[in-house]
Amino acid sequence: MDYVSALLPPTVMAVFFGALITVIVKTQGGANKAKEDAAVDATLARAEGAHQAAVPAKDA
């Protein structure tokens, strides 16, 4: 019975990991894809703007 207790946690974790990957793959795209992409683009633009404002420009 020691082998069962040794194999059970990795097996359970593997099953949950497989289910997580399945959910992630199935939820990609769909009706909200454009809205999610726009939100990511806006966040990246804000981060880029903040980074440029924090770094002083070098004069040539």
Image (tube, helix red, strand yellow):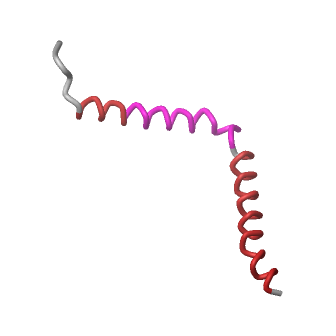
Reply above or below: 31 against 58.
below
Query: Which x, y percent locates residue 20?
Result: 70, 57
Magenta stretch holds residue 33: yes
> Residue 12 occupies which quadrant of the picture?
bottom right
Query: Which x, y percent locates residue 5?
Result: 76, 82
Single out the residue that lies furthest toward the top.
60
Q: Main secondary structure of the magenta part?
A: helix
Query: Which x, y percent locates residue 46?
Result: 37, 34
Reply above or below: 54 against 24.
above
- Residue drawn at 23 percent across, 31 percent down: 55
Reply above or below: 43 against 13.
above
- Residue drawn at 60 percent across, 32 percent down: 34
Find the magenta span and give its range. Answer: 28-46
Specify the quadrant that holds the C terminus.
top left
Reply above or below: 10 against 1.
above
Q: Left of 16 or right of it: where is 40?
A: left
- Residue drawn at 56 percent across, 34 percent down: 37
Q: Left of 44 or right of it: where is 58?
A: left
| Camera-nearest residue between 46 and 16 | 16
Specify the quadrant that holds the N terminus.
bottom right
| Camera-nearest residue between 7 and 17 | 7
